[in-house]
Every structure is written in C-alpha cells, then in structure tokens.
Image (cartoon, coloured by chain):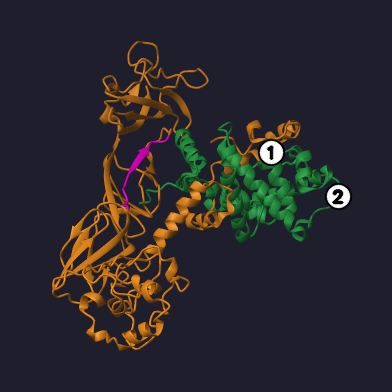
Chain colours: A green, B orange
Amino acid sequence: MKPFVNLSSTPVDPDVLRRWIERCQAKDSQGYRLIYERFAPVMMLAIRRYIKSEHDAMDVLQDGFLKIFGNIDGYTFRGSFEGWMRRIMVNTAIDALRARKSVWLVGDNEEMLDNIMDDASVEVEEPEWASLGQDDIVMAMDKLTPMYRAVFNLFAIEQFGHKEIALKLDISEGTSKSNYAKARRNLKVILRAKLAGENRGDK
Amino acid sequence: MTEGGSFDESTGHPQGSSDDRKKKAGAPLEAGMRKALDRAPGLAAPAWSWMEGALQGGAVAAGAAQGARWILHARLGAAAVGGAMVMWGGYVWLNDDEDQRPEDQIIVEAVDLEENSTPDQDALSTNYPVSVDGEPLPVEPAAPKPTTVLPDPAAKPAAKPVGISHAKPAPSASSSAAPEETENVRLKRNWNDVPAEERTAFGSTLDAACVGAEVAFSTTHQLGGTRVLWNFGDGHFSADYTPSHVFNEAGVYDVTLSLTRNADGMIRTRTIKNMVTIHPKPTAGFSWEFPRLAADRPLVIFENLSTEAASSTWVFDGDLVVDEFAPAVEMERVGEHTVQLVVSNAMGCQATLSQHVEVGNRFGLKAPARFSPNGDDLYDVFLPDGLRNSPGTFVLRVSTPDGTLIYETTTIRKPWDGKLLDGSTAQSGSLFQWSVIERYDDGSLGYYSDVLEVE
C-alpha cells in the first residue's frame, strides 16, 4: 500500500496555493515550508535540465528559493505561480552556468546551420515523445554539453525566442540557432534509442 | 497547472518571439517533451530542514517577523538540550557576598530586623561563597577571595542599586577607618558555625518546562527552626520546605525564598531572577481540503494549524504514521478515516487532535450509476439525489477518465446535462468520473466520488 501521492504531479488547488503564498508574504515560515515541499521536486527537475551535477543543482535550488521567498511580495497572483517560480529557477541556473565560464564555453562556436535534417525529411515515424519519463529526459540532457543543453531547454521547454536566448547566454543569435539544431538532433537520436529500447523490452 | 512550461506576460516574458514559438509549437519532439515534463513528478529534493537552514542564515532579505520566529525556535531548541526532565536549576546561596553577586541573576533583599546596621553583624554575614550554576563552591572560610568564579567581576559595590539593609551601612559607617578590621573578621569566621539558613541555596527540578508541568523546589540544607516562604513569581506561594508548583501560564518566573529564623525573627530573602522558564504548550490543529479534481479517490491535502509545534506526526487510520508537516494523502477506502495529529514542541511537550475524514461513494449521496442524456425526459440529467436536500453547500464536478474537468456546478438547479466541452452530448457507453465536495454548516467537509455511465 502506498497511499501517499507525490503531489508534484497533481495541481495544487488554487485556493490552497493562494493561502500558501499569502502566508509567505506574511513572512510565515510555515508558508515557506509548504511551498518548498510542494514545489522543490519540480524545480529540481527544471534545474537538472540545465545543470548536470546534482550538487550544483542543489545549490541552485537553494539560491532560487531564497530569491523566490525574498521576492514573493512581488508576486501579484497574475499568471501561474509555478511558472513564475520556474522562471526564477531557470535564471538562477543560467547564472550559475555563466559563473563557471570554462565549462560554459564548451560547444560555443559560430558554426552555421549545416544541412540539419528537418522533421519532414525524416522518413521514420515520430515516436510517442510524450511517453518519455522525466529520468529519460534528464539522462538525455546530461549527454549534451552545457551550452547545447541550455539553448535547447530555453527554446523548446521554456519557449524563449533565439533573440532572447542569445541575450541571456551572451552568444549570437546564429549560435543559438545552430546549437539548438545540433542539440535537437543529438537528443532525438538519444531519446529515439531510449524509446525503441523500451518498446522492444515490452514485447 | 497546465501552463506547459510557457511563461505568460504576467511573468515578465518579453514579447516579440512568438514566431519562433509558433514555429516550434507543433514540433512533435518539443511538444512531447513539454507534455512529458508537465506531468513529471519531479526529482528528489533535499528536505525542508536543509532549506530552512539557509533561510535562517539570513540570506532572505525579509522582515523581522520571520527572524524573530526563528530565533524563538533556536531558543527553544537550546532550552531542550538533553531533553532531560530532571535537571537542577541554579542554586543561589542565600548568604553570599553581595558585593560580588552577578547583578542580573540575584537580588538581595535581606533585612535584619533587630540588629540593623551593626558593623560586626554585617561583617559576619556577608562573606560566603556564591554559586549560580548549581555547583556548590568549595567551602573555604579562610580564602580571602572565594567568589572569583562569579561571572560579573565588573560589578562595583558603589553601583549596586539594590541595597541590603544589614550589610550596606558597614562601609558607609567606617569605610575609611577599618578595611583591615573587616578582613580580619572574615578570616575569623568558620563556615561550619554559620547557621544552615544562611548557608543554604535553593534550586528546582526543572529550569524550563511547559505549561502544566510540576516543578519541585528544595534547599540544599535542612532548615531547622526556620519558617520558609516560597514566592513562585506567578502570584502563588508555599510555606512547605520542599514544595512543588504547577505553573499555569507561559512566562519566565523569578522565584523568591524567604527564611524567617524562629529564634530571633531574622528574615533572609533571596530571589533568583528568571529561575523557571515556562513554555507554552503546543496545540494541535489541522484542516483539510479536497483539491479540485474529480478523481476516483480523494486526494486529501492537510493544512497544519498547530501552534508551538516543532514536530508533527500524523497517524492515519491508526496504523500509518507520517512525519511530514502537512501531508497529502490519498484516501483509498470509502468510509470514515481517522486522522490523528500529534505535535511536540522543542521541550517535548505534546498535544494531540483527532478528526474524521469522510470518504463516500455514490451510495452515500444516492447518486445513480448511469443516466441517458437523450432528450426523452427520462434521466436526462445527472445530479445525486442526496444533494437535493443537502444542508450545506456543495460543488459537483464531472471529468473524463483522464482527469479533464468538463462540468462543475454548485446548485441543484444546474445538474449536468451530459454536454461535453465542445458542446456535443456524451456518447452512449462512455464513462465519466464525478466527485462532490460538500461543506456542512459546521465547516466540515464530505467527499463523494464514483463512476457514471452514459446509457
């Protein structure tokens, strides 16, 4: 019997969440705790898409929550709270990456887009990407260089434009585009293999 | 939360990149990954205590309120070191050298009724060792400075705000004339000659406890021929030699012992400032919510309303124990669930609250198992019968088996007519999940859920 649901996968009731946030805004440490315990796992997942080392990811998690709690007065209940938090987390993760420039620069080059295959030109059928597990995604991300990883996540998951990404990462727009295309191609290979392996295993 | 990883305007996302976004929105890899991540449970994160430590480090630029709260916790924590319920508080000798006493701990109010301001008497009764930490000092009457262990060496006799009526006049009467004389008198004094009531110190079994705890007091020496009066500082007194006292309110109490010698009526009084700290008892309190989901089992989210609780332990149906602060539990069984919350403060004092969470199926609300929204006026709409004379308010939700909410109503005048989100009518044979959260007049909640089939 495992009666405990990991709440992270289910929405928090909006009324309940509002009360939690209001408690935080009143500097009630129990409010901080409720928010932290509920959202830390998904924030950790968001961070780990950018940062390979679990230890570094924990640092970012802590820094990010400190920023969230320090600025929670500024949250005005317009728009998704989780989105607001994740934005702070992602920015914190990017800052952490940029702080370690030596690692960061790997993969940062100006190569132009070179005949990257478009989805349409690929003969094989698209697999059921949505059936990917979070561990598969994190595993695949870990195989990319930090720059590829950051560009891919910012564009595909956070849905920033290349112009913004270029500004954020201090690279050119062209680099962002080319890195994205390469990251995407690599990811597809890794994840396709992952999904194919699972399907074979099922049968 | 279905924002799908995107940021809307209110989050400050800059505009102007919608082309990029649109272009990729339909790309199967990206869309699939976003979907996968959206329902991902997340990765293991460190426990709250780890985060709390960082917050306490003052890293958050936050107000004083939370700081004060955490400092309070730290204080409670320090008070509970060891957790021992039997420990001796500080002893203070009734008969110390008042010139050396630590100002913040002891107030001397000894009054010599009959021999007020006689110089030899003063000398005789003012040079005995003091201990404030529970460890009696070695008795060495010949030692000229037995009081050097005191924590307040800076205290100057002239600065003493609290006078001692039988000791003070000595220096004023003959301060320039006879300092050596005083010294000589001290040296002549034999500790064993000092009566017990002058040598005794007093202490308590606890120096920190919770409201309602019994604290026992006693003296280090047997007192014969002396009447005692204890003032516990909360308006209660005792004339017992070794009294026990229950403090009924939180606070920090000064305890005073007065000794009256039967033979000559001499009264000696000593107060130990802040001798006993009584902490508030924790109170256990919780409420719960059924989140806005139409699920086959209710997810119950508990809110912890306890006060003064350093730790919380939840017991569900008597056998499942959880140490989370505010857990979320799926109640699998239909029926009444007993939820018990036990909270403890840093002193180890506990409080308990037990409440019942009711989980029902369609029988609890007299809800039909199926209906036929085909316009023939027979069972065309769905509404559990039990709601028709419900004493409280309710919300009925209907969702598809995959959890998409398709109808919500709070009034019996608007039952579900079988219409789906796109306006079409539910197909015959399709299944839906419904849930009802009822809120009764006393604030309690009822949860009912079951499957509904379209005929």
Report the front residue among B368 and B200: B200
A75 to the left or right of A158: left
A68 to the left or right of B220: right
Q: Quadrant of the C terminus of chain B?
A: top left
What is the magenta range? B280-291
Relative height, residue B12 to residue B135 (above, below): above
- The image quarter containing residue B383 is top left
Q: Does the magenta stretch include residue B284?
A: yes
Circle 1 sits in a helix, a strand or a loop, which is it? loop
Label 1 chain ID: A
Report the front residue among A27 and B20: A27
Residue B307 spot, x, y in % from top left: 36, 47
Label 2 chain ID: A
For the residue carrying disc 2, how many other residues have a C-alpha within 10 Å: few (<14), some (14-19), or many (20+)?
some
Circle 2 sits in a helix, a strand or a loop, which is it? loop
Q: Distance between the residues labelled 1 and 2?
A: 22 Å
Residue B364 spot, x, y in % from top left: 26, 30
Q: Mark 2 points at which residue?
A: A110
B34 to the left or right of B119: right
Mark 2 residue type? Glu
Q: Which residue shows up at 32% across the image and 26% down it?
A: B369
Residue A150 spot, x, y in % from top left: 71, 49
Q: Which residue shows up at 76% across the image and 40% down it?
A: A164
Mark 1 residue type? Gln
Relative height, residue A200 to residue B192 (above, below): above
Q: Mark 1 points at which residue?
A: A159
